[in-house]
């Protein structure tokens, strides 16, 4: 994975950026990578949709189990990935048609030559990405000289760097330990490192270490981490009706979840490998976007409420940090036609 370094530019710029999330859930050792999430076999011509361990994406499992895709007349081959990075590479290779992924990672993929399109905002992280520390560490300054684990290049590594930057602590002052997300959480619980940056549901695993506590989270950096449904452009051009049906299914799933909260929590908790009680603790840490919030996000603006603004800032960051030789063209990255069509259908346009 690619290393990231913070620039000396203002923190408002930095908090707009989102990076890669993902990998194995150490709590349950799910081994279903590249398999359909359902127990049935894939239907020929089905939309191949990838997702991985993040609370904002677990509603896809609800849609699968409650037959919501079928209700919207679309066959979906829902694929669960233990490793988020594998879902990204699989989409880029055209082995799946769509994936749930961060805005920053999508911009980075476009910078590398991928032709991808954001058609839906799933959520913003508002606390489910955390830096968790051992007993006795009570401030960012206390991280000096300590071993801090994170998956290098992930959104939580980025969150760690944001926290250090805000506290004016050079990143060289900590002993950074690059570990895959699941292994990082496990190493922290085992006492092998002093702090860890992870996302839910790995936060639940990390906090099982006696005396551990949250030092800071994505709640402290509003707008830093946003998550989306992303399709390959060619697939959209050839199958607009199927893309529309998937978007419709997402919003129908949110309606189902609101009306059937207990059942929805049960399904999502099982997918996440945690108890229902633990899963409910994630609710405030992920802001699932409504239809109205989606419509607003796709509009131009001069702040982080606009996806176009955020993507432009992200592209500049890639250049400034040496991760891209030139600023990627994000002018065609967003397509709100499907959200608009759904909104018009339900009278919310």
Image (cartoon, helix red, strand yellow):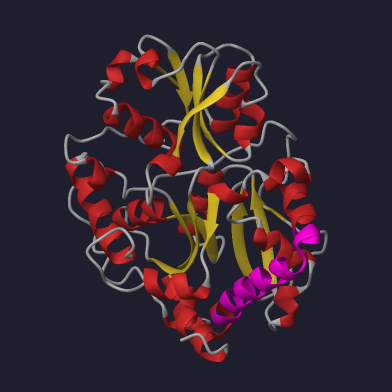
In this rendering, the answer to whether 61 lies above or below 294 is above
The chief SS type of the magenta part is helix
Percent from the top left, x then y, of residue 248?
60, 79
Residue 246 or 205: which is nearer the viewer?
205
Residue 178 seen by the camera: no
Vertical arrangement, residue 187 with respect to residue 64, above or below: above
Tell me what residue is drawn at x 68 percent, y 82 percent: 72
Residue 45 covered by magenta stretch = no
Specify the quadrant of the image occupied by residue 221.
Answer: top left
Please state, as top left, top right, bottom left or bottom right, where the N terminus lies in the image.
Answer: top left
Image position of 284 with respect to 330: above or below: above
Q: Residue 54, percent across and down?
A: 59, 48
Q: Residue at x 62, y 66 (%)?
A: 48
- Numbered range of the magenta stretch: 244-264
Give the left or right position of residue 312, taking residue 99 as reference: left
The tally of labels here is 0
Question: What residue lies at 37% left-to-right and 9% top-to-bottom?
Answer: 145
Which residue is painted at 49% across and 43% down in the image? 21
* Image coords of residue 68 (percent x, y): 73, 74
Quick check: 100 left or right of 12? right
Asked if residue 248 is among those painted magenta in the image, a careful observer would answer yes
Q: Is there any visible trace of residue 11 in the rendered image?
A: yes
């Amino acid at each position: 994975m690619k290393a990231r370094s913070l620039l000396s530019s203002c923190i408002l710029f930095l908090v707009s950026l989102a990076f890669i999330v993902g990998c194995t859930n150490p709590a349950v050792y799910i081994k279903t990578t590249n398999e359909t999430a359902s127990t049935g076999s894939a239907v020929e011509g089905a939309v191949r949709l990838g997702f991985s361990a993040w609370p904002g994406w677990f509603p896809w499992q609800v849609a699968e189990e409650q037959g919501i895709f079928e209700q919207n007349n679309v066959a979906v081959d829902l694929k669960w990935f233990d490793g988020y990075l594998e879902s990204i590479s699989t989409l880029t290779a055209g082995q799946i048609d769509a994936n749930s992924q961060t805005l920053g990672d999508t911009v980075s993929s476009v910078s590398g030559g991928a032709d991808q399109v954001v058609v839906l905002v799933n959520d913003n992280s508002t606390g489910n990405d955390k830096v968790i520390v051992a007993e006795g560490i009570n401030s960012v300054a206390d991280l000096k000289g300590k071993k801090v684990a994170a998956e290098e290049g992930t959104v939580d590594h980025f969150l760690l760097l944001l926290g250090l930057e805000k506290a004016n602590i050079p990143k060289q002052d900590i002993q950074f330990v690059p570990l895959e997300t699941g292994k990082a959480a496990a190493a922290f619980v085992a006492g092998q490192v002093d702090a860890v940056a992870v996302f839910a549901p790995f936060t639940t695993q990390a906090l099982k270490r006696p005396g551990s506590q949250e030092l800071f989270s994505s709640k402290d950096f509003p707008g830093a981490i946003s998550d989306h449904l992303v399709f390959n452009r060619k697939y959209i051009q050839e199958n607009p009706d199927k893309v529309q049906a998937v978007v419709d299914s997402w919003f129908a799933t949110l309606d189902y979840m609101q009306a059937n909260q207990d059942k929805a929590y049960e399904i999502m908790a099982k997918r996440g490998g945690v108890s229902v009680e633990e899963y409910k603790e994630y609710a405030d840490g992920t802001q699932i976007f409504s239809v109205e919030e989606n419509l607003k996000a796709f509009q131009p603006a001069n702040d982080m409420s606009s996806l176009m603004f955020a993507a432009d800032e992200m592209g500049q960051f890639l250049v400034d940090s040496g991760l891209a030789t030139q600023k990627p063209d994000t002018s065609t990255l967003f397509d709100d036609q499907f959200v608009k069509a759904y909104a018009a259908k339900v009278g919310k346009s």
